[in-house]
Amino acid sequence: MATVLSVSGSPSASSRTNRLLRHLDRRLTAQGHEVIPLDVRTLPAEALLGADFHHPAIVAATELFARVDGVVVGTPVYKASYSGVLKALLDLLPQYALTGKTVLPLATGGTTAHVLAIDYALRPVLNSMGAAHIVQGWFTLDKDITVHEDGTLSVAPDATEALVQVVDQFSAALDRAPVLTAAG
Ligand SMILES: Cc1cc2nc3c(=O)[nH]c(=O)nc-3n(C[C@H](O)[C@H](O)[C@H](O)COP(=O)(O)O)c2cc1C
């Protein structure tokens, strides 16, 4: 069993990315992993924007990254790239905060024109932070994610099939990876 940090990088209070990640968290939990959700928008804005490395909430987030085996990084595509709040958090982490970790990059977006944003924008950053293994990611169109009035989520069948595949590949990679300690 691995421990996974599931990071949602949308600033939106009604974020589809966030809902999608929490939906996928349940699949990872059912596969025996411990999943810790982290919504970047809940971190204090003044700490994120003021580069306050020593703010208790930033220190706590940094410790979470240090103690997990795997990280799901989910972002909406904004202006053809990942979100600014996600970058603000990543900038406050140690340079090699992802050393030895297995990472699953996910994105949601409004147009397939930016389907490669994971690969040209997000993946290089994750790689620079020392990720041991960045598994295949997936871009989901926002129109394929429906949040119902009762709060439940449904995802279009084709997108569901692809997401299940990348989540299961991530899960299998976690199972194969050597277990990390907090000391790395
Ligand atoms: C400020 C802003 C910029 C956006 N830029 C893009 C873009 O460049 N490419 C794209 O495919 N979608 C773009 N979108 C659409 C969002 O990526 C999409 O609706 C996403 O699912 C929103 O996720 P969220 O609800 O988690 O914030 C943009 C949305 C906003 C609000």
Image: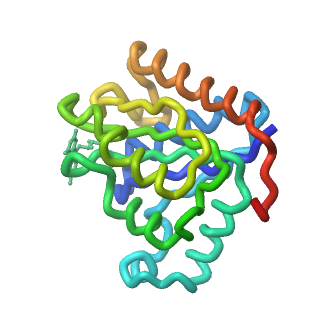
In terms of depth relative to the viewer, which is nearer, 23 or 119? 119
What is the number of callouts on the image?
Answer: 0
Quadrant of the rendered image containing residue 45: bottom left
Quarter of the image containing the C terminus?
Answer: bottom right
**Residue 116 on image: x %, y %:** 29, 34
Relative placement, left or right, of 78 versus 123 is: left
Q: Residue at x 27, y 49 (%)?
A: 81
**Residue 42 on image: x %, y %:** 49, 66
Quadrant of the rendered image containing residue 49: bottom left
Q: Residue at x 49, y 30 (%)?
A: 136
Q: Residue at x 53, y 39 (%)?
A: 134
Which quarter of the frame holds ligand 1? top left
Residue 57 drawn above or below residue 178: below
Relative placement, left or right, of 3 versus 98 is: right
Q: Residue at x 81, y 37 (%)?
A: 1
**Residue 180 on image: x %, y %:** 78, 51
- Colouring method of the image: rainbow
